[in-house]
Amino acid sequence: MKIVFMGTPEFAVPGLRKLLTSKHEVCAVVTVRDKPAGRGQKMSPSAVKKEAIETGRPVLQPDSLRETGFLESLADFNADLFAVVAFRILPDVVFEMPPKGTVNLHSSLLPKYRGAAPINWAIMNGDRESGVTTFLIEKGVDTGNLLLQRSVGIGPDETAGELHDKLAVAGAELLLQTIDAIQDGIILPRPQQGEVTMAPKITPDICRIDWSRDPEAIRNQVRGLNPYPTAYSFLNGKRIKVHAASVAALSPGMPGEILHADRKTGELIISAGTGSLAILSLQPEGKRAMSSKEFLIGHGIAVGARFGEA
């Protein structure tokens, strides 16, 4: 089949690569405009555009998905199917264009975690299972009829970044399997069933640590926001990003209170909810990420001081 692939970030690249080496023809790629990035703010293409250029595929980068010129160019490819991975919400004039429909790859087991950040929310909620889903796009966000699903386990210490990489690989395989099945006419779309949960965009408020929550909930928040956008708190008026933490055994004090700080061992234990949390890796404002031992050696941290106060 002739396919137009639509996507933007690194998560979409394995799926594009899988299709490029398959029996199908990727006749074009649609992605976002180049954006300024890095310290020099130089214009940088998306990860998907970089891959498309390397393989010589035409790339479309519309400002609006309703632009007349874009729609005409898209129609000229005469694609049988559109494949979408981590892109934008498509208007009906786009997703209704190909005769075989528009397939979306989503990084959850729909209808669980519809929305922008399913990987983060699965880990922040302490789930032990995630997965990938292919479905046919319709007007509602992540509401279309299901095609195929694959479950993927979540390790007890797994971060969002690690799960992201696993799901990108599993999703690429599922996307190709789905498109092969559509071509062979052996797949039957089915309505989504089960409890619907949402995975909204991660905001700064979601990233801020509430030390009145239980230690396990905070630990899940930290790993669910690692490596980006990262959980954070404040200490002595300075923002501190927390990259890794574990549940500790000390009895609680006031929420956010430093219960133990040992420069020799690197133990930094904070009161949280009904227990305590050991900070393992953190990043002071304007500094690089470092271990708790490095942090304690370089900063005058006293027992009794409190995290959480801006």
Image (cartoon, rainbow, N blue to C red):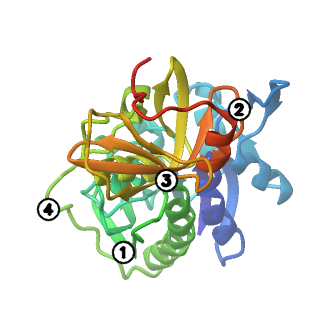
Nearer to the camera, 194 or 68: 194
At x 39% / y 74%, what residue is drawn? 153
Q: Residue at label 1?
A: 151
> Considering only order in the chain, which callout, 4 or 3, is on the residue closer to the N terminus?
3
Residue 298 in sight from this viewpoint: yes
Task: Mark 2: give few (<14), some (14-19) or many (20+) Cα within 10 Å.
Answer: few
> Considering only order in the chain, which callout, 4 or 1, is on the residue closer to the N terminus?
1
Task: Mark 1: give few (<14), some (14-19) or many (20+) Cα within 10 Å.
Answer: some
At x 18% / y 52%, what residue is drawn? 196
Q: Residue at label 3?
A: 98
Q: Quadrant of the N terminus?
A: bottom right
Name the front one of labels 4 and 2: 2
- Mark 1 → mark 3, Cα distance in angstroms: 29 Å
Q: Residue at label 2?
A: 287
**Figure quadrant of residue 41:** top right
> Considering only order in the chain, which callout, 3 or 1, is on the residue closer to the N terminus?
3
- Mark 4 → mark 2, Cα distance in angstroms: 45 Å
Q: How many marks?
A: 4
Q: Quadrant of the C terminus?
A: top left
Q: Are marks 4 and 2 in contact (CB under 8 Å)?
A: no
Task: Mark 4: give few (<14), some (14-19) or many (20+) Cα within 10 Å.
Answer: few
- Residue type at mark 3 is Pro
- Mark 2 → mark 3, Cα distance in angstroms: 50 Å
Name the front one of labels 2 and 1: 2
Image location (x, y in percent) of residue 92: 39, 38
